[in-house]
Amino acid sequence: QVQLAESGGGSVQAGGSLRLSCAVSGNFFSSRCMGWFRQAPGNEREGVAAISPGGGNEIYADSVKGRFTISRDNAKKSVTLQMNSLEPGDTALYYCAACRLGDDMIWNNFAYWGQGTQVTVSS
């Protein structure tokens, strides 16, 4: 069983930064791809960023490339999303997610989810 707990959300003005963290419990953390997703009111949940088990590969949604950075610390079983140059369009509930063991790092393979943390960006 994998449990995820996000922290670090909040309210910020456009152009500002926030850092989201995800603490993970359960086995085989270093063997799972990890990711961040978001869902704004009235929209479907979308993938934002993901990172491979060893941390060598990352993928990003086009809308956040160059502004967001995902990282992981396998020793601490944690994942971080650094968000810079935030825009009002980034306002959403952000979820940390984990893949099943052995699954490829694609958006549809994330099976475990946290409760989410709210990010609000004002203009």
Image (cartoon, helix red, strand yellow):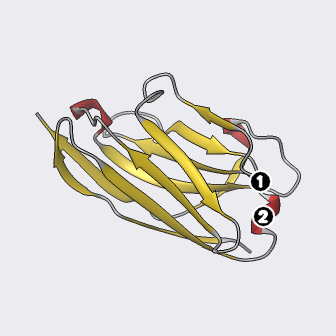
Report crowding for label 2: few under 14, some 14 to 19, many 20 or more residues within 10 A (C-alpha).
some
Q: Amino acid at mark 1?
A: Pro
Q: In front here: 64 or 3?
A: 64
Judge from the rendering whether residue 119 lies leftward or rightward of residue 15; answer left or right: right
Q: Secondary structure at mark 1?
A: loop
Residue located beneath label 1 in the image: 53
Relative horizontal placement of residue 90, taking residue 63 as reference (left or right): left
Residue 19, x across and y down, in percent: 37, 55
Q: Which quadrant: the C terminus?
A: top left
Identify the residue at horizontal 31%, vertical 52% (top origin).
18
The answer to the question of whether label 1 and label 2 lie on touching residues, with beta carbons closer than 8 A, is yes
Q: Can you name the residue that lies furthest to the top here?
A: 62
For residue 107, what is the image quadrant? top right
User: Does residue 112 sit above or below 76 in this rendering?
Assistant: above
Q: Quadrant of residue 27?
A: bottom right
Which residue sits at x=41%, y=58%? Answer: 20
Q: Is residue 91 left or right of residue 58?
A: left
Q: Residue at x 20, y 42 (%)?
A: 121
Residue type, label 2: Ser
Rendered location of residue 31, percent (x, y)? 82, 60
Q: Nearer the viewer, residue 30 or 95?
A: 30
Whole-percent x and y of residue 69?
Answer: 50, 42
